Image (spheres, rainbow, N blue to C red):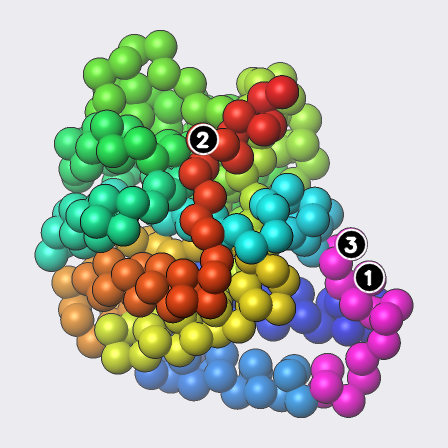
Amino acid sequence: MYVAVALEVKRIMCGPICFPTRQCGDRSERELLHGRLSVILETWLETKPSQIDVYSLQKLRARCTIWHSIEAVGVSSGEILLSFDDGPNPIDDTTARLLDILGQESVRGAFCVCGKSIGDAPELVDRMMTDGHLLVNHSYWHQPFALFSEKSLEKEIDDCDAAIAGAVHSPSFKSQFFRPACGWRTPALGRLLPRLQKQLFPITDFGYDTNMTRHNYAKWVDRTLQVAKRDGGGLFVLHDRRLRFWGERFYNPADKESSAYRGWVPDAAALLIRRCRDEGFRFMDPHTFAGDRRS
Ligand SMILES: [Zn+2]
């Protein structure tokens, strides 16, 4: 069990959440802190593995987060489903160029859009739908604490659905899926989703792409390909927009040296698609995924 807890701490500290620390806000210091923690935990875990611990870890992850094994998610062996979170992002035409790449490669993905991002570029959400991608509700304000209150969470979900409905000019639009901010699962979420007739949109790997920059995204591609080969496929995430980390003082999504800048994401997606296809993987249509869950 201690291994499960340690891995979850590592996931949180090295994942999309940044705990406020004295250094937090200085990107290089924060990444250094995460890197050190990661190395310490990886080293410890490598010396203490056991089947029971791995099983405990999987149970804990599946209970507390949107993570599920590829078998539980239902992505077939040899298939990959791509999801893109927190957008749309009009800076440097990031999301528009991503949509271009997906169109050229004939890949459809799931766009987990945030209400507050939609206001910056509603036309991109309309294009996502026109291009055949799946629109997933990712809340309005992307506030993880709202996940602990059924009432707050319902408003987050309703407001995001309304923003999507406005963007796609379809007042009756209701998303089939919801992906919670930061990937957390809470009891309130478990109670609310069935009442709203929505389903959780899962993930099979937290790739930590929110910590990547235009200089090192190839590492994310390498790692994701390795995970796909290990698991026989997967449901992966890239952030075409990266919202502010908790306590992040210097957040500037136009700063090309920071991980908040996402202009490299279309290139990362293109590279991943090419390399996965070279390895024989196929890209799953998210509407097939959605249809399988309706029946
Ligand atoms: Zn998010």
149 on left or right of 85: right
Quarter of the rendering containing residue 134: top left
Quickly name the residue at label 1: 56
Residue occupying image coordinates x 58% and y 87%? 39
Check disc 1 and report its element: helix, strand or loop: helix
Quarter of the rendering containing residue 242: bottom left
Amino acid type, mark 1: Ser
Could you tell which of marks 1 and 2 lies nearer the N-terminus? 1
| The CB of the residue at mark 2 lies under 8 Å from ligand 1 | no
Quarter of the rendering containing residue 275: bottom left
Quickly name the residue at label 2: 287
Label 2 crowd bin: few (<14), some (14–19), many (20+), radius 10 Å? some
- Image coordinates of residue 175 in percent, x first then y, are 44, 24
Label 3, label 1: how many angstroms apart (C-alpha)?
5 Å
Name the image quarter holding the C terminus: top right
Quickly name the residue at label 3: 59
Residue occupying image coordinates x 41% and y 72%? 220
